[in-house]
Image (spheres, rainbow, N blue to C red):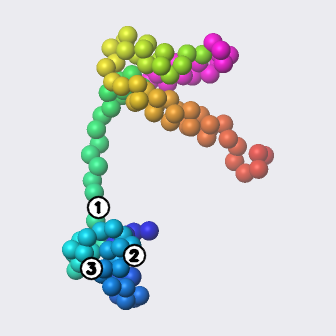
Amino acid sequence: MELLSVIRRWHYRDHVPIREIERRTRLSRNTIRKYLRAETVEPEFKIPERPSRLDPFAEKLATWLALETSKSRKQRRTGRRLHVDLVALGYDGSYGRVAAFIRNWKAEQQRARQTTGRGV
């Protein structure tokens, strides 16, 4: 739910005092007053798009992961080993980014394998 609409509903429709809204939302009274006076619907925060250090290596890593799925479980490289191999190719980012990429890649593969409906 949008916080601004909840604050306005509590104050104008339910007649909840500002101090009680402060307790419920853990916002300051001044912020709540500002939201009640504001004409805007909801404050928007822009998150800048930043290129990842992994972007130049993403295609290579995805190819490696696709090749690893065809191997038996004991023969596969771990995420740590894939990170070491990327570092050898010139990647200077963290292991956490590689692990996040692997998690997202595996989730996408899982969604692609799932059938729609009841498996028909």
Q: Residue 88, image x and y in percent?
A: 38, 10
Q: Looking at the rendering, in which quadrant would you find the N terminus?
A: bottom left
> Which residue is label 3 attached to?
36
Look at the picture and state if 119 lies above or below 75.
below
Mark linked to residue 6:
2
Residue span colored magenta: 59-75
Neighbour class for label 3 at 10 Å: few (<14), some, many (≥20)?
some
Q: Residue 79, image x and y in percent?
A: 50, 22
Look at the picture and state if 88 lies above or below 115.
above
Q: Residue at x 29, y 61 (%)?
A: 44
State which quadrant residue 7 falls in.
bottom left
- Hey, what amino acid is under mark 2? Val
Q: Residue at x 55, y 16 (%)?
A: 77
Query: What separation in Å lies between label 3 and label 1 (alpha carbons)?
Result: 16 Å
> Which residue is label 1 attached to?
44
- Whichever of callouts 2 and 3 sits on the residue coming sooner in the sequence is 2
- Hey, what amino acid is under mark 3? Leu
The chief SS type of the magenta part is helix
Query: What separation in Å lies between label 2 and label 3 (alpha carbons)?
Result: 11 Å
Q: Residue 107, image x and y in percent?
A: 56, 37
Query: What separation in Å lies between label 2 and label 1 (alpha carbons)?
Result: 16 Å
- The answer to whether residue 85 is left or right of residue 78 is left
- Hey, what amino acid is under mark 1? Glu
CB-based contact (under 8 Å), mark 2 and mark 3: no
Viewer can see residue 47: yes
Q: Nearer the viewer, residue 61 or 34?
A: 34
SS category of the residue bearing label 2:
helix
Neighbour class for label 1 at 10 Å: few (<14), some, many (≥20)?
few
Q: Residue 29, image x and y in percent?
A: 25, 75
Q: Residue at x 69, y 48 (%)?
A: 116
